[in-house]
Amino acid sequence: MISASLQQKMQQKMSPQQIQLMKLLQLPTALLEERIKEEVEKNPTLEEDESTPKEEVASIDEVDKPSSEESDMDFFSNDDEIIIHRNNNDYQGEDNLSFYASKVSFHEDLLSQLSLQDLDQRELMIGQEIIGNIDEAGYLTRPLSSMVDDFLFSQNIEVSEQELEKVLNIIQTFDPSGVGARDLQECLLLQLDRQEPIEEIVLARKIVGKYFELFKNRQYSIIAQKVQSTQEQLQAAIDEIVKLNPKPGNSLYSTSSAIESVAIIPDFIVWQQNGKVEFQVNNVNNNNNLHVSSYYQNMLKQLENKTDKASKETISFLKEKLESANVFIDSLLKRKNTLYLIMKNIIDYQKDYFLDGDVRKLKPMRLVDIAQRVDMDISTVSRVVSNKYAQTHFGIFRLKDFFSNFMVNEQGSKISTDTIKNQLYQIISEEDKSLPLTDDQLAAMLKEEGFPIARRTISKYREALGLPTARLRRKII
């Protein structure tokens, strides 16, 4: 028997305005401009005012908090004998001011360089085939003998290995240096061949060319005897080898045409002035004020009393677009206020750090800490922090870099993991390079300093700092 009944239940749903705000919060400044242009193009009732508004500057010591009602919210690694590439012997961390823009893929750049060579049609075709077999690291992954078969079976063209070798030698002169190598040894030799033949470079080339296996296995004493060099000369040559790039293809380019490395536009500008930390939300790419078109508003008023079908459809269309325009403008304002509020509290929480950029002054801070201060959901804070950058007087950083977990020491005090990493780096940088410290020894030393962490955690932090194992840090003294 069929019966009817009534049920009452509570269900939480986000309004379209809230959904749009959440999406806008996630957008960094670089993409916000595109989103605004997209909205203006599809909504004729939304217009841009070309006049530039005044920039707003905030000091965390002076500016009041915005209303919360407006916020809805290893030398050689074990991986295929590839060495860790560093341009300096000592770890300096990420260069926070080194950002570049590149819209040409790695393979497109190689093909462009190929087209500039004085080659006939057959050599050009061979070159294109070779470049097609170069992987994203810059290595030729297919043997020349196999490529001979490829030409014969796929294109019914007979080519010799000598022809392939000739064109490959030309490609190996392309930038970046080392591209087109068939193994790591050849890659390093190609790079050394381009350098000025000073004493340490000549010795480095001899080591890589004749004693590469001994070099990989760190048998320096045997190498020193064979090349008849002093320890100082040998160390200078090894230092030059370490500076070489084992993956030339990854140096500046993206191999995917769909993925481009773009210049970073900071979402916040932070500076220190007279002992105060000041900041502003960066509006450099979306300075144009948006407003609802008065033309379409007047049109709607003129059509309100008309009852014909065409007028009703026009009225419905205009009301929908005008409401959408108002919601979008309101969402942009709420986005700006939310970004402002959260950044203000981040700076306030980490004020000592922002004054001089000393990482040792970076306090343990979690997303939940900021969420509680601004009285917002943690997901809202997460959206604001995601993919956002702040330009400070000591570099450009992701907002996520200002957050860190913590551990509790024996005294019950909270210690930031960034502080522990910094201490670990200091210990390793000051160690005896002829007898570097193992992870167990590092763990014991940190425990003595009040950081009781496990050996596996040491390994994780060391890898995060880009520091190799003890065996790979050993140097000749």
Image: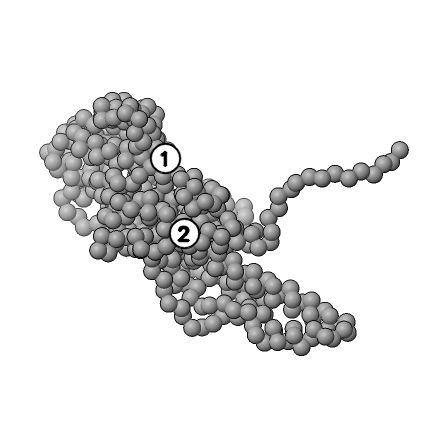
Does 52 sit left or right of 91 as displayed? right
Please, which residue is most extreme toward the right here?
Answer: 1
Q: Which one is closest to the eye, mark 1 or mark 2?
A: 2
Q: Can I make out residue 179 in this image?
A: no
Mark sitting on residue 355: none
Q: Position of residue 105 (x, y in %)?
A: 42, 54
Q: Is residue 329 left or right of residue 52?
A: right
**x, y (%) of residue 416?**
31, 35
In the picture of the structure, the residue carrying the numbered disc 2 is: 341
Quarter of the figure with residue 206? top left
Quadrant of the rendered image containing residue 426? top left
Marks 1,2: beta carbons within 8 A: no
Query: x, y percentage for residue 270?
Result: 31, 54
Please, what secondary structure does the residue beneath circle 1 have? Answer: loop
Looking at the image, can residue 440 be seen?
A: yes
Name above or below for residue 78 compared with residue 144: above
Q: Position of residue 254 (x, y in %)?
A: 41, 50
Query: Which kind of residue does numbered mark 1 sit on?
Result: Asn
Q: Which residue is mark 1?
A: 405
Q: Residues within 10 Å of mark 2 (few under 14, many from 20)?
A: many
The foreground one among 92 and 265 is: 265
Q: Quadrant of the C terminus?
A: top left
What residue is rendered at 74% in x and 75% in y?
306
| Along the viewing direction, whichever of 150 and 89 lies nearer the viewer | 89
Residue 146 drawn above or below residue 106:
above
Label 2 sits on what residue type?
Answer: Leu
Note whether 156 is above or below 182 in the view shown. Answer: below
